[in-house]
Amino acid sequence: MTSPESQSDGRETPRAEELLPLVYAELRAVAGAFIRGERQGHTLQPTALVHEAFLRLADKDRMRWQDEHHFIAVAASVMRRVLVDHARRRKTEKRGGDRLRVTYFDTPLVEGSADVDLLELDDALNKLATLDERQTQVVELRFFGGLRVEDAARILDVSSRTIEADWSMARAWLRRELMRS
């Protein structure tokens, strides 16, 4: 195994395989929250979701991880991609296919709705990214990564109040977009 790169402050940059054992339980819990809201007979399991995300992250050998929270933030984005890819494959397998619906009870995205159609959410997030990239990142960190406001603020290097405002704005915008679907 090659040694990790050094950060500008002299500390070694941890590699994905070093960080995974530290955050595995947290990532597994986040993945489990998504899968709990699935239809019966859903084929993607939380462990498989985490492992697929890790395999994609391991390919990013030169990625400089700041810490466990940074790794979880990127893993959340990767899990979003895995879930969306899985939903698209399912949809093409069955004409009109089963849509992947995700539920995350600790961090509701749309008030009054326990679950959200993942493909519709992904489309809406892609639209939001063209308007406000940081709000999209906040949704990924909070909803897909299960991070608290304080952790998201540290990762994005903004105040907690900014994260709360972005979260409120993004949720309102997404609620409107998802209601149109």
Image: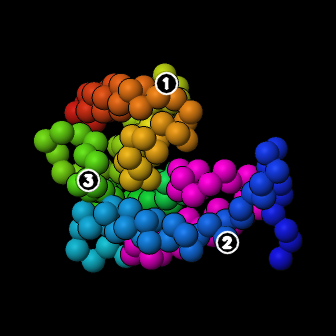
Element assignment for label 1: loop
Q: Which residue is mark 1?
A: 132
Residue type at tag 2: Glu
Q: Is residue 57 above or below residue 135?
A: below
Residue type at tag 1: Asp
Q: Quadrant of residue 165?
A: top left
Nearest the camera: 102 or 41? 102
Name the disc covering residue 17, or none: 2
Please say whether residue 49 is one of the residues in the magenta stretch: yes
Q: Residues within 10 Å of mark 3 (few under 14, many from 20)?
A: few
- Which stretch appears magenta? 45-73
Q: CA distance from mark 2 to mark 1?
A: 32 Å
Q: Which residue is mark 3?
A: 106
Element assignment for label 3: loop
**Quadrant location of the C terminus in the rendered image:** top left
Main secondary-structure element of the magenta-colored stretch: helix
